[in-house]
Image (cartoon, rainbow, N blue to C red):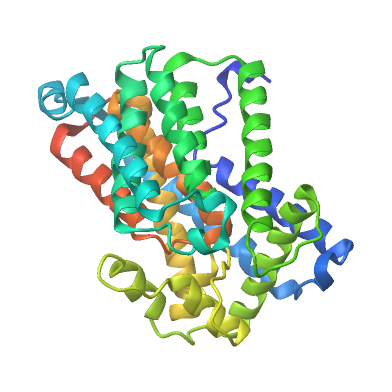
Amino acid sequence: MNYKKLDIFSPVVFVLLVVIYLVFSQIAFHYHLKELVGININTIYIIFLGLLFYLVGIYFSHYLLKNRDFSLDKNKIEKIFSEKIVLSLVILGILLQVLNLLYLGGIPLFSGYLKAHAATRIWLLSYLIFLPSINILMAKYNNKKYYLLFMIGLILFVFTGYRTTVMAIVISMLITLYYTMDLKWKYIVLSVAAIFVLLLIVGYVAVKSIEWQTWTLSPLQLLFYRAGYTLQVLDRAVLLQGSTNGQLLYNTLMGFFKSTDPRVIVGSTTLGYAHSTTSMIFGPALLDFGLYAMLIQMFVLGAVMNFIYMVQRSLGNIFVALYAILLAHVFIWIETGPTDLVVLLFFLITLILIGYSVTIRKGGV
């Protein structure tokens, strides 16, 4: 096998990561971490059915576009994403996060009370600006001095105590550099190991800093426990299909205007009490509309991700950064589920930019 031709960040890798996540959950069940007991086999069948539809979606979009040529109107892109504009946006995102921490009056990573209030509108705006701009900056104008901005921004987001945003930043940057710098395998392995360690540290410190909870698990046990716990929540969601009647989708789409966290609805429905809970990528659609909705979701996700993948592989430019951002969030969705309006906005922005600047023509056979 020619490993140099193996694209480890194609949309198909999502399936492998779901399987790894299931292995982690089985470790938690095997050792009964915090009394986890396991799940019904039907839930596993539904997961693999969802993965099958995801792969069918990938094949469908590949089939439709396999004889198509992509061309980019660079003038349109350059007008929007000049180096000065993108660099200014990166700095603005950093300054907004500094302002957010000053507004909170402390570092949420070390305080559960501060973390509960850390996701302000300033934080959201900072994330919306910083994540795409730092990836676009590195994809189009890679310069060693810009790595300092990346590190400053990463540290500031680590201070907020949210694992998902930290993971999105580091994973998307790894994917961006993978496609733009032709990283050697040893650097990829080291980067993945570093991301794994960062995940353990941020997750563990954030949990241990919650004053009203007591945890005795080690960082590694906590990682396995989260996988097992989330899978058990999905197991309950399978039994409660259609019970939320679209509330999760509605509250996700209305994220800027409503204060209700969709994950609290997941917790209230599956656990019987208000608690922010994740149910894997399959759970929200199952709870809202049932099995058919989840299968449609997975099919559409596979088709859209493969379409954007083919665009970025053909044209590069900013689409490498946008694909990296979306794939990183899809990885995160394996645990959290698609209940974040900001990620849906990233998808919308990417598709609008493709429609605005990319021409698709019928090519040769």
Give the percent coordinates (x, y) of residue 270: 59, 82
Residue found farthest to the front: 105
Residue drawn 61% across the image and 23% down it = 188
Residue 349 visible to an observer of this rendering: yes
Image-based side of 116 in relation to 39, left or right: left
Image-based side of 91 in relation to 225, left or right: left
Q: Foreground residue, 157 or 51?
A: 157
Residue drawn 64% across the image and 80% down it = 236
Quarter of the image for residue 280 reads bottom right
Image-based side of 256 in relation to 82, left or right: right
Residue found farthest to the top: 144
Residue drawn 67% across the image and 24% down it = 189
Give the quarter of the figure containing the N terminus.
top right
Q: Foreground residue, 160 or 288?
A: 160
**Taking 263 as reference, is 338 above or below it?**
above
Image-based side of 137 in relation to 29, left or right: left
Residue 291 visible to an observer of this rendering: no
Give the percent coordinates (x, y) of residue 329: 46, 48
